[in-house]
Image (spheres, rainbow, N blue to C red):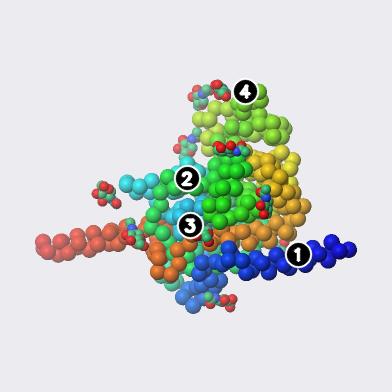
Amino acid sequence: MLKQIMLPLLKLLSLFLLAFSPATVQAQLKIGFYNKTCPSAETLVKQSVDAAFTNNSGIAAGLIRMFFHDCFVRGCDGSVLIDSTANNTAEKDAPPNNPSLHGFEVIDAAKTAIEATCPNVVSCADILAFAARDSSVLAGNISFKVPAGRRDGNISRASEANANLPSPLSNATQLINAFAVKNLTADEMVTLSGAHSIGVSHCPAFRNRIYNFSSTSKVDPTLSLAYATLLQLACPFNTSTSGNTTVALDLITPAVLDNAYYVGLQLSLGLFTSDQALLTQANLTAAVKDNAEHPGGWATKFARAMVKLGNVDVKTGNTGEIRKNCHFVNSASIDVELYVDEEKESLVATT
Ligand code: HEM
Ligand SMILES: *[C@@H]1O[C@H](CO)[C@@H](O)[C@H](O)[C@H]1NC(C)=O
Ligand SMILES: *[C@@H]1O[C@H](CO)[C@@H](O)[C@H](O)[C@H]1NC(C)=O
Ligand SMILES: *[C@@H]1O[C@H](CO)[C@@H](O)[C@H](O)[C@H]1NC(C)=O
Ligand SMILES: *[C@@H]1O[C@H](CO)[C@@H](O)[C@H](O)[C@H]1NC(C)=O
Ligand SMILES: *[C@@H]1O[C@H](CO)[C@@H](O)[C@H](O)[C@H]1NC(C)=O
Ligand SMILES: *[C@@H]1O[C@H](CO)[C@@H](O)[C@H](O)[C@H]1NC(C)=O
Ligand SMILES: *[C@@H]1O[C@H](CO)[C@@H](O)[C@H](O)[C@H]1NC(C)=O
Ligand SMILES: *[C@@H]1O[C@H](CO)[C@@H](O)[C@H](O)[C@H]1NC(C)=O
Ligand SMILES: *[C@@H]1O[C@H](CO)[C@@H](O)[C@H](O)[C@H]1NC(C)=O
Ligand SMILES: *[C@@H]1O[C@H](CO)[C@@H](O)[C@H](O)[C@H]1NC(C)=O
Ligand SMILES: *[C@@H]1O[C@H](CO)[C@@H](O)[C@H](O)[C@H]1NC(C)=O
């Protein structure tokens, strides 16, 4: 009886503490940031994501992962969208992103539609944040408001993607640390890992577990043997023939953003060493169990954690820029315009 009363009270108390703890004070992002300056912005993004999803539902996973990879490298500043140049290998061409990251054309379509309606107002970083939310709705009916006002960065380095993005070979300590650096808790790390309930992986990311795992065991003993056999069939030993092959991350409900990922983990169906690592520390294991048992609770936590992920190191106010084209920093486009203008002038001058 007492426990039944105490639990709701504790929940209320923790909600109260959450709302007032300084750790949750969010930069200056605002819900409805474009209410006045570009009221159709979020609708235009949604239209672009909806169209892409109708054609290929795998796009939702691509966009959610792209958002995560943007936020973990220089904050959520659209740096993952910048193209490499002759002088610079950009984030998108780092091994954790290339060739696996996809959905850039969806961001481009949204940006083009938005620039045609309200030019120079909506950042690429915000478009990506909206698109990740719209993807969560489409893949899992997980809906949340996205505080906006992010500004775009003008630096994108492959080396920083390599340094900041957690590897699928990570152990629990490494995962906790990679998220702690971004002010995300171990529990939020477990919650966000639920995104692995949709989408696919290329064979090399889990190859370590199915061939030559150790001197005593060819297959990782913490992986279901039946599943390992399936994975070996999909991913032949010869890397040169399986490098581009992909398999689903969640065997149970591969296309639905739900808590089945955690159920699968408990059945030794986690795909990566890093997925499996969530069962190597008592604290994390408890969170996995809780998420496996409470789909609604997990979905609520996932929405909240996505908003928090969207606050990592954001640029606001007058910092950064509103990129004209998500692929290029503005100085690059201005250089091109000036070059063309100068050429015209010199043409005029010589005739
Ligand atoms: C905890 C550390 C994490 C690690 C080590 C990790 C690693 C990976 C790897 C290796 C892949 C497969 C890429 C490929 O080869 O195609 C992948 C896919 C994916 N990851 Fe993660 N990830 C982590 C956390 C997250 C988070 C926090 C999110 C989002 C909130 C996320 C969303 C996804 C999605 C949706 C896919 C499928 C992508 C697609 O289908 O294109 N991951 N992840
Ligand atoms: C934008 O409008 C919505 C709905 O009326 C409101 O909830 C939100 O606070 C507004 N945001 C801003 C920054 O004006
Ligand atoms: C539709 O999806 C396929 C992949 O499934 C992709 O190759 C193609 O470009 C997409 N078409 C459009 C119009 O988005
Ligand atoms: C690339 O580097 C060279 C030599 O450092 C420099 O002259 C050139 O301006 C750079 N180009 C760009 C686009 O930054
Ligand atoms: C989606 O979630 C809302 C509540 O957030 C619920 O009312 C609605 O029925 C759900 N839709 C589907 C298709 O499950
Ligand atoms: C996790 O990996 C790090 C770096 O390789 C290593 O130092 C640490 O001992 C590992 N922790 C565990 C518990 O295996
Ligand atoms: C994490 O929080 C600290 C203290 O509030 C802050 O100084 C730091 O910039 C934050 N880091 C990120 C990545 O948000
Ligand atoms: C398997 O791993 C061992 C070391 O762990 C290595 O000596 C051996 O060459 C590997 N075999 C194959 C076929 O990769
Ligand atoms: C791997 O496959 C490639 C292409 O089919 C082939 O040329 C190569 O000999 C194979 N390597 C091995 C070790 O089987
Ligand atoms: C994988 O895809 C890339 C890009 O499409 C291609 O260059 C490469 O040859 C492919 N590799 C294999 C083994 O099919
Ligand atoms: C376990 O998790 C709780 C809440 O996430 C945290 O406060 C506590 O420090 C963690 N304990 C250990 C041993 O990691
Ligand atoms: C990037 O932006 C900063 C300030 O926002 C500016 O000082 C710097 O010159 C810019 N660099 C490039 C390459 O555009």
Q: Is residue 240 above or below residue 148?
A: above
Q: Nearer the viewer, residue 251 or 349?
A: 251
Mark 2, residues whose alpha carbon is within 10 Å: few (<14), some, or many (≥20)? few
The amino acid type, in three-letter code, at marker 1 is Leu
Task: Single out the residue that lies furthest toward the right.
Answer: 1
Disc 4 target residue:
215
* Residue 106 in sight here: no
Badge 1 element:
helix
Depth check: give the residue in front, 4 or 290. Answer: 4
Residue bearing mark 1: 10
Labels 4, 1: front one: 1
- Circle 3 residue: 75
Identified by mark 2, the residue type is: Ala
Which residue: 58% across, 33% down? Answer: 207
- Mark whose residue sits in front, 2 or 1: 1
Q: Position of residue 27 (x, y in %)?
A: 51, 67
Q: Which residue is mark 2?
A: 163
Check disc 4 and report its element: helix, strand or loop: loop
Residue 119 lies, with reference to residue 293, above or below; the image says below
Q: Residue at x 64, y 26 (%)?
A: 218
Horizontally, is 1 left or right of 223 in the view? right
| Ligand 7 closer than 8 Å to label 3 CB | yes
Secondary structure beneath disc 3?
Answer: loop
Q: Which mark is residue 96?
A: none
Discs 2, 4 touching: Cβ within 8 Å: no
Q: CA distance from mark 3 to mark 2?
A: 13 Å
Q: Residue at x 70, y 65 (%)?
A: 14
The residues bearing labels 2 and 1 have C-alpha atoms spaced at a distance of 39 Å
Q: CA distance from mark 2 to mark 4?
A: 29 Å
